Image: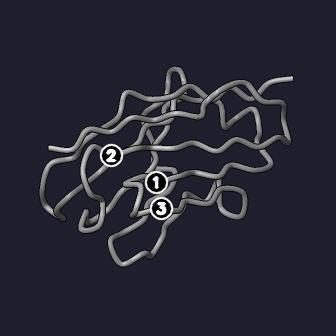
Amino acid sequence: QVQLVESGGGLVHPGGSLTLSCAASSSIFSIYAMGWYRQAPGKQRELVATIRVVGNTNYADSVKGRFTISRDISKNTIYLQMNSLKPEDTAVYYCNAKPLPSGNDYWGQGTQVTVSS
């Protein structure tokens, strides 16, 4: 079982930047995939970005070129650098870990990101 704790959310003006962090309770060295998802009010949870065990990344079209997912294996932490934020990026952002390709998913508690002037 993996426990995930997100941090770094907050209120930011349009065009601003935020960095989210997700600390895992155990080593992320061999976790198949980790990622960020978000859920806006009244909408379904959607994928934002993922990073796989070999380091390849995947992004939603809506965030390509603005968001960057990364990881620090020594700290058991993944990050989401968010630049050029837009009001439509407002959502609760959730960290996800999938230790095995066909196994269970683990979720953090979520962190609120609000983009507003």
Marks 2 and 1: CB-CB under 8 Å? yes
Residue 24: mark in rendering? 2
Instruction: Tell me the SS state at disc 3.
Output: strand
Q: Quadrant of the C terminus?
A: top right
Task: Report which residue position mark 1 lands on.
Answer: 78
Q: Position of residue 81 (x, y in %)?
A: 64, 52
Give the class, few, some or many, for how many residues have Cα within 10 Å of label 1's Cα (few <14, many ≥20).
Answer: many
Residue 78, given in percent of the width and then of the height, sits at 46, 54
Q: Which of marks 1 and 3 is nearer the N terminus?
A: 3
Image-quadrant location for residue 89: top right
Marks 1 and 3, how far apart in space? 4 Å
| Within-10-Å neighbours for mark 3: few <14, some 14–19, many 20+ | many
Disc 2 to disc 1, how far (Cα)?
8 Å
Q: Earlier in the sequence, mark 2 or mark 1?
A: 2
Direction from residue 65 to residue 57 in the image, left or right:
left
Residue 40: quarter of image = top right
Which residue type carries mark 3?
A: Arg
Q: Could you say which is closer to the camera, residue 27 or residue 17?
A: 27
Left or right? Give the position of 76 relative to 27: right
Q: What residue type is labelled 2?
A: Ala
What residue do we see at 80% from left, 24% from top? 116
The answer to whether the residues at label 1 and label 3 have Cβ atoms under 8 Å apart is yes
